[in-house]
Image: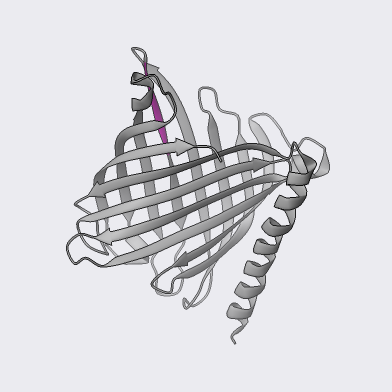
Amino acid sequence: MSFFQLKKRVASLASITLVIFLLPCSLQAGDALLFNESSVTFQHGDNYRVGGKEQSIVTVEHLSVWSWGDVFFFYDDLHNDNTGHSSYYYEVAPRLSLSKLTGRPFSYGPIKDVLLASVIERGSDGFDGLLFGAGLDWNVPGVAFFSSNFYYRDTDDVAGNTWQTTFVWNVPFNVNGVDFVLDGYTDIRGAEGLNKGDLNFNPQLKVDVGKLWGYPKVLYGGIEYSYWNNKFGIDDVNERNVSALIQMKFTL
């Protein structure tokens, strides 16, 4: 077993243990679960790069906010409509809030909180990644949520290591009585081994369709735009894809 494989297994075990241990303890505390939201999204686009030009994707997402931090999870089931081949990819991203853990505010100016951040990545093609670092949550007027996370990144079967910066946002707004949401993320990664550095800008613009029928914040329709330079670290493979999407949200 290589040093990286041992480190990856230890880090994975530590993260899983953290979730398994803290969640039951938090549940016993009664008020530890502060917020949770899940969603299922179906999208289709016909200008993807890598994995087939035309793809249908089903994404399951879950976010829970606890008295000690938060956990974000998503799972992508990807179907290549040209070949019929299917694959999957998922991430688990727990973060520990220094303000909540210490009982002292780690805030200054627009900075709302400082967190210890980590991500475990897995893919059906054997892709494994481990990230850990620090996160900042921000107070931004008119923005429901904005965070920036700064990671050390190590990818299995790729020589060396690198850095990654991730921005996540959620901006609700209203136009003539119709509710919209502009949310998404941006990943910026440095070069690692033979992989080039890449930039993945992935916003979604959605309208609250359910509200038009009297059921707000349940059913959304809209588009996702993928702007990805050097996709998967492949030199000069640049994706510009617009996909249609339908999303259903619920709480557990």
User: Residue visible at 41% across and 23% down?
Assistant: 215
Q: Picture coordinates of residue 43 (x, y %)?
A: 29, 46
Closest to the observer, 31 or 225: 31
In the image: residue 52, left or right of residue 75: left
The answer to which quarter of the image holds residue 21 is bottom right
Decide if residue 230 is in sight here. Answer: no
Q: Picture coordinates of residue 146 (x, y %)?
A: 54, 36
Can you name the residue that lies furthest to the bottom here? 1
Can you name the residue that lies furthest to the top here? 176
- Is 235 part of what is drawn in magenta? no
User: Residue visible at 45% across and 37% down?
Assistant: 249
Which range is magenta?
178-183
User: Residue visible at 63% across and 56% down?
Assistant: 133
Q: Picture coordinates of residue 194 (x, y %)?
A: 40, 74
The answer to which quarter of the image holds residue 139 is top right
Q: Characterize the magenta stretch by its predominant secondary structure.
A: strand
Q: Picture coordinates of residue 3 (x, y %)?
A: 62, 82
